[in-house]
Amino acid sequence: MKQDNWKINTNKVQLWLESGDRGDNGKAIELSIMLGNNSDDDELRSTYWTAIRSIGSSFDDFPMARRGRESALPEAIELAATSVKNTVIAAFAGITDADTILKVILPHGRSGGAYDDVNAFGIAFGAKAYSALVHGYKDGRWDGSMEGNVPQMTAPPLKADLEAEQEV
């Protein structure tokens, strides 16, 4: 694996590792990243990358487990949006009195049911945050700029403002 690809991919994994405790598997992934960072051999980095993906595949939220098309977003935008998503997930993981929240904040009405746990709740809101950033980027309301961990995105226009524009 080329050095540039290694950096891009391991940055995504590193953000994921920082978003929660991954136990011994996380330590194994961190070790593989360290070994790959210290390697000058593309083939050896590919071997480490295979190990990282294999170990990470046991986690539902592992960022490199995606199948199908690669993101059409520029790499910097993808990394920033993923970082925000992981920050949101981590923030929800720290909610106190989660039992109350899980009883009154429910998934979309058409799907019914409730969130299994605070982690599922956080993952759902992390996905919403990611989606909002992608839509903001595509609409020209976000250029990927961040202030610390906070994306500098303009809110979408109000529906009334859009209707007023269409009447003109």
Image: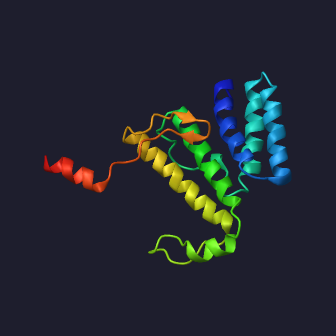
Total numbered labels: 0
Q: Which residue is nearer to you in this view: 128 or 71?
A: 128
Residue farthest top in this picture: 40
Task: Identify the image quadrant of residue 40.
Answer: top right
Taking the spot 57% from the left edge, 50% from the top edge, the residue there is: 67
Q: Position of residue 158 (x, y in %)?
A: 32, 53
Relative placement, left or right, of 152 versus 49 is: left
Q: Which residue is nearer to you in this view: 135 or 94?
A: 94
Q: Position of residue 108 (x, y in %)?
A: 48, 70
Q: Which residue is nearer to you in this view: 135 or 2?
A: 135
Residue 12 position (above or below residue 58): above
Is residue 65 in view? no
Is residue 131 in view? yes
Taking the spot 65% from the left edge, 40% from the top edge, the residue there is: 12
Task: Identify the image quadrant of residue 75.
Answer: top right
Taking the spot 61% from the left edge, 77% from the top edge, the residue there is: 103
Q: Position of residue 56 (x, y in %)?
A: 73, 50
Q: Which residue is nearer to you in this view: 145 or 61?
A: 145
